[in-house]
Image (spheres, rainbow, N blue to C red):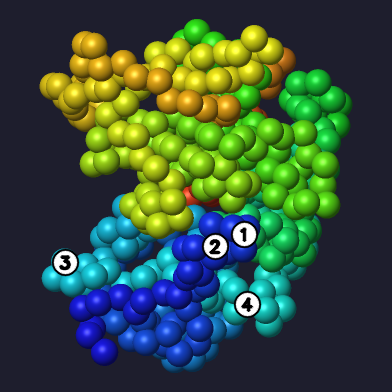
């Protein structure tokens, strides 16, 4: 084998997978995992660990894979991560652990994410469960939201002996892992539900259909329900729009709504009568991972799909792997293009979208070259569905119903320390509720920091 190159990972054929919701990437088998693990240099000063927001001891777990001790490898990962099978699939490893891998300087980085996925899947298939705390410490903590940050915070606190209850607004736990990321990237029952069961095995209680700020407030949890600390990991579920004419027409969705209907309401399953108009000609406006997810979902629901993005391919914020998969499956990329109006028929439905061509000018505040309109380059795309994927911001419901909780102008909760402590005593926050939309692993890192902060706060009390 060529030690400078990654062990290839098997995938479904693009023509076949474009017609189903089965997982695209098939992962490593045992032989492939052992081959890939042998490429790790076991560095004395492992930069990969510094690149991991939850600080997994990467060389140690890979050493156990090399030694054919997958149980020991899973135990090492489990000390740092409550969601290894999720992270192995959806983390942007190329910018984090693998981006720092020494092997990657002269060759290709070790496939750390694919090895993590292999170990996590092996542990699940062999029914390896995490070990709960030896005894409860008598303290109660509430966690709001069962997405990556909430699940991580809850898991870490449960291991320390706290009685933890997660309150989830939707009818299924998992947050963005169940409503936002499509089945073909992250299987819900096989992976997400199994990792949530592991948290329950640690003693975490999950209450669904509880909307904090309506069903019960944070002040009531602290003052009347006996919780001594609260972690807010409610995510960023409020979609952004462009504010262009026609945006309120039938057939215009936010990516959040489109993906939620497909994922949680099973629009991908013919046995479910989900109220979704999947569209025959669909444009997805935006260039991030969520835009790729929405486009690839619409494709699988039978549509011709275009991504409309105002910059060039170099500036696409989505992972290279996601863009590559979308192209392989047949998604068309209309780059350097910006919508100016959504056209509406006499019945109030989308009939097309007027766009203008762009060129890149000088860099803006983000460091990327600013897109500038080319006069006279307008054209019309014939469409029946438009999906806006322009990012999300935190829902103001929690902050508006909690006394003494400071927020910034983007509706994000202000934290005063790295632990996630907020302006209100005993209340911590992390993930997208603080930063706005970011990655699963960064939200997990915030949940981890908050668990440490809450433990220190309650011990000091």
Q: Are marks 2 and 3 in contact (CB under 8 Å)?
A: no
- Quadrant position of the N terminus in the picture: bottom left
Q: Residues within 10 Å of mark 3 (few under 14, many from 20)?
A: few
Q: Residue at x 27, y 41 (%)?
A: 313
Cβ–Cβ below 8 Å for labels 1 and 4? Answer: no
Q: Which secondary structure, mark 3?
A: helix
CA gap between label 3 and label 1 equals 37 Å
Find residue 123 and name its label.
Answer: 4
The reply to whether discs 2 and 1 touch (Cβ–Cβ < 8 Å) is yes
Q: Mark 2 or mark 3: name the one nearer the start of the chain.
A: 2
Q: Residue at x 28, y 58 (%)?
A: 99
N-term-proximal mark, 2 vs 4: 2
Circle 2 packing at 10 Å, graded few (<14), some (14-19), many (20+), is some
Q: Badge 1, how many Cα within 10 Å: few under 14, some, many 20+?
A: some
Label 1 element class: loop
Name which residue lies at 42% across and 36% down.
Answer: 307
Q: CA gap, disc 2 to disc 3?
A: 34 Å
Q: Which residue is mark 3?
A: 105
Which residue is disc 1 drawn over? 20
The residue wearing badge 2 is 17
In the image shown, does 361 or 238 lie closer to the viewer? 361
Q: Quadrant of the C terminus?
A: top right
Instruction: Tell which circle, 3 or 1, labels the residue nearer the N-terminal end.
Output: 1
315 or 440, which lies in front? 315
């Amino acid at each position: 084998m060529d030690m400078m190159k990654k062990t290839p990972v098997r995938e479904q054929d693009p023509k076949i997978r474009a017609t189903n919701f089965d997982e695209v990437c098939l992962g490593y088998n045992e032989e492939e995992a052992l081959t890939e693990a042998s490429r790790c240099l076991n560095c004395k000063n492992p930069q990969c660990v510094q690149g991991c927001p939850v600080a997994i001891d990467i060389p140690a777990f890979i050493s156990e894979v090399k030694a054919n001790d997958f149980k020991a490898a899973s135990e090492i990962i489990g000390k740092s991560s409550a969601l290894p099978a999720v992270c192995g699939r959806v983390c942007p490893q190329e910018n984090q652990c693998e981006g720092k891998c020494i092997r990657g300087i002269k060759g290709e980085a070790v496939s750390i994410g694919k090895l993590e996925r292999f170990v996590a899947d092996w542990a699940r298939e062999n029914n390896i469960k995490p070990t709960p705390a030896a005894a409860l410490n008598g303290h109660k903590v509430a966690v709001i939201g069962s997405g990556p940050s909430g699940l991580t915070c809850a898991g870490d606190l449960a291991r320390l002996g706290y009685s933890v209850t997660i309150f989830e607004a939707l009818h299924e736990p998992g947050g963005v892992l169940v409503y936002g990321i499509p089945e073909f990237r992250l299987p819900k029952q096989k992976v997400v539900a199994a990792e949530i069961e592991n948290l329950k095995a640690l003693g975490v209680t999950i209450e669904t259909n509880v909307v904090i700020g309506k069903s019960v407030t944070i002040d009531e949890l602290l003052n009347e329900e006996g919780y001594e600390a609260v972690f807010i990991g409610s995510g960023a579920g409020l979609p952004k729009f462009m504010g262009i004419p026609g945006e309120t027409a039938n057939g215009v969705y936010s990516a959040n709504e489109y993906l939620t209907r497909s994922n949680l309401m099973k629009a991908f399953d013919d046995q479910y009568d989900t109220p979704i108009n999947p569209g025959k000609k669909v444009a997805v406006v935006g260039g991030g991972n969520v835009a790729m997810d929405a486009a690839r979902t619409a494709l699988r629901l039978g549509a011709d799909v275009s991504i409309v993005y105002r910059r060039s391919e170099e500036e696409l914020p989505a992972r290279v792997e996601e863009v590559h998969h979308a192209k392989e499956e047949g998604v068309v990329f209309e780059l350097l293009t910006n919508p100016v109006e959504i056209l509406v028929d006499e019945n109030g439905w989308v009939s097309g979208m007027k766009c203008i061509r762009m060129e890149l000018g000088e860099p803006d505040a983000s460091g990327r070259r600013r897109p500038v309109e080319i006069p006279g380059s307008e054209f019309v795309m014939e469409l029946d569905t438009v999906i806006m994927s322009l990012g999300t911001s935190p829902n103001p419901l929690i902050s508006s119903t909690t006394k003494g909780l400071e927020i910034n102008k983007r509706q994000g909760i202000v934290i005063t320390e790295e632990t996630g402590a907020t302006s209100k005593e005993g209340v911590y926050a992390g993930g997208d509720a603080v930063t706005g939309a970011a990655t699963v692993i960064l939200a997990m890192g915030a949940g981890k920091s908050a668990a440490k902060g809450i433990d220190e706060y309650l011990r000091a009390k």
